[in-house]
Image: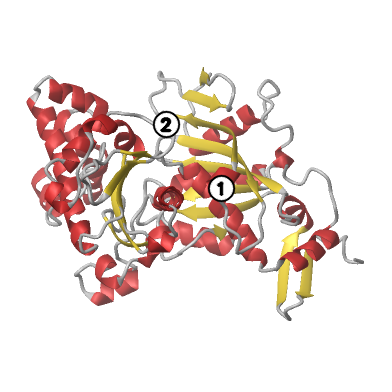
Amino acid sequence: RDRRSQLMVNIKITTLKGVQARVGLSRTHWRNIRTAPAEKRIKILVLNAGSSSFKYGLFSVPAKPAGMDLLPKESTLLASGQIDQIGGPPDKPNIVTLEIPGRAPIKLKSVKQIKTNHEAFHEALKILTHKHHAVIENISDIGAVGHRVAHGGNLSKAAIIDDKVMGLIRTASTWAPLHNPANIAVIEAAQQALSSALHVAVFDTAFHQTMPPESYTYAIPRELSQRLGVRRYGFHGNSYKFILQTMASELERKESELDLIICHLGSGASMACIQQGKCVDTSMGMTPTAGLVMGTRCGDLDPGLPSTLARVLNVSLADVGNILNKKGGLVGLCGTSDMREVEQAALRGEEDAVLAEKVYVQRIRKYLGSYLVRLHGDVDAVVFTGGVGENSARIRGMVCEGLQRFGISLDAKKNAGRSVGPLEISSAQSFARVFVVHTNEELSIALQSVTCLAEAAQLDSRAREVVATEAGSASGAGG
């Protein structure tokens, strides 16, 4: 008690079971994240920075001790929003949105062009703390910040951000040059503005670390793959984690019992094969360019094509990378990256759009067949999620067409329907059930952040009560 004046509070406790744990967190941090008693809640700000967009969400989440499951239904969304066209043309203002449950959505045009994710973060914070919105009275109410980070290398779960973790994120930027630098910029800005909160990195790649070597190993010299870390990593892990948890609840089964094929179809698109609750294969690779056809990314192609294009066009490999990432996919095939526009053009009979739609669907079916074999045909559910997966009955129908002998068939009427919760669209004759599920990556990040903080403390419930007492009973502890 006589050391309270010091910045760091180091506590060593022997629990009733004789387990010792040492924790060194600032007094302010303990004030914001202390987790006893169980009814305490913590406000988590989730930041999801993309290459040209910025999403944010504020959640109230139960502050449970380590080992206790955090369920989506126990969490409350306080506010969410998005900022588009970051770094876009100077004459095109950014669209800034704020949605607060129970109120009409707010849509604003930025006064000046938002050029960076650093600026986007401060714009979002300004909106959340604005007196007219009354979402946050004081930024010190934010107990933790969950940062979506695209590439975490070999890290298998969320991590409290320190110098070592920041170093790993910077190193992994080699494999995610469009995303990780944006994530780093926001982390640095948020750490400075929200210094009283704990910051947690939640990685898109972590979910896929359960893949066996035969799924993630590339057939290149072993020395190169081992020295450089070249392997399949996979992405959209936060979405897959949320879908897995949602399906376990929907089917009233344990996650460890489920065999799923999940199709995350959006501007970025990928698929994952889940066996007994763990990812055993996924379509994206070392970078988010591999796999399915996407809005502007090409997906799988001949590995010899980049060097051939560089030679024939007399351009650098970086230029070729720009073509494959920003000028490929749907926009390369038919001039638009928006699947809604592709569908409309295809229905009008426009040749390029018809081909783009067929290529898009064929790639999905190719992976679907592969994953059916991987699971020996024993699939509990095929799940469609993401902007296209959730909203395009046409694409879902094309993907599942003619698969009755493989145990998959849709009910056309159900497939045309909509639902807030999980929607089953399979027919009565379908062996595998087929669902449409709305993903929520921001909520997944919030839940993983709280779990990370609880695990980091490594204390049982009795030890936590002692820690809370020693750290003081300061008011305003994260809501």
**Above or below: residue 282 compared with residue 14:** above
| Res 388 quadrant in image | top left
- Residue 292, numbered circle: none
| Res 93 quadrant in image | top left
> The residue tagged with tag 1: helix, strand or loop?
helix
| Res 436 quadrant in image | top left
Is residue 337 visible in the rendered image? The answer is no
- Label 2, label 1: how many angstroms apart (C-alpha)? 27 Å
Is residue 37 visible in the rendered image? The answer is yes
| Residue 376 x, y percent position in the rendering | 21, 64
- Classify 10 Å Cα crowding around label 1: few (below 14), some (14-19), many (20 and above): many
**For marks 2 and 1 on the same chain, the one whose residue lies earlier in the sequence:** 2
Residue 139 left/right relative to 295: right
The residue located at (43%, 47%) in the rendering is 250
The residue located at (26%, 43%) in the rendering is 325
Mark 1 is on which residue type? Answer: Ala
- Residue 87, numbered circle: 2
From the image, state whether disc 2 or disc 1 is nearer to you: 1
| Residue 41 x, y percent position in the rendering | 69, 47
Q: Quadrant of the C terminus?
A: top right
Residue 311 left/right relative to 434: left
| Residue 109 x, y percent position in the rendering | 50, 18
Residue 268 left/right relative to 323: right
- Residue 446, numbered circle: 1
Using the image as rendered, state which of residue 160 and residue 283 is in the foreground. 283
Mark 2 is on which residue type? Answer: Gly
Using the image as rendered, state which of residue 410 and residue 449 is in the foreground. 410
> The residue tagged with tag 2: helix, strand or loop?
loop
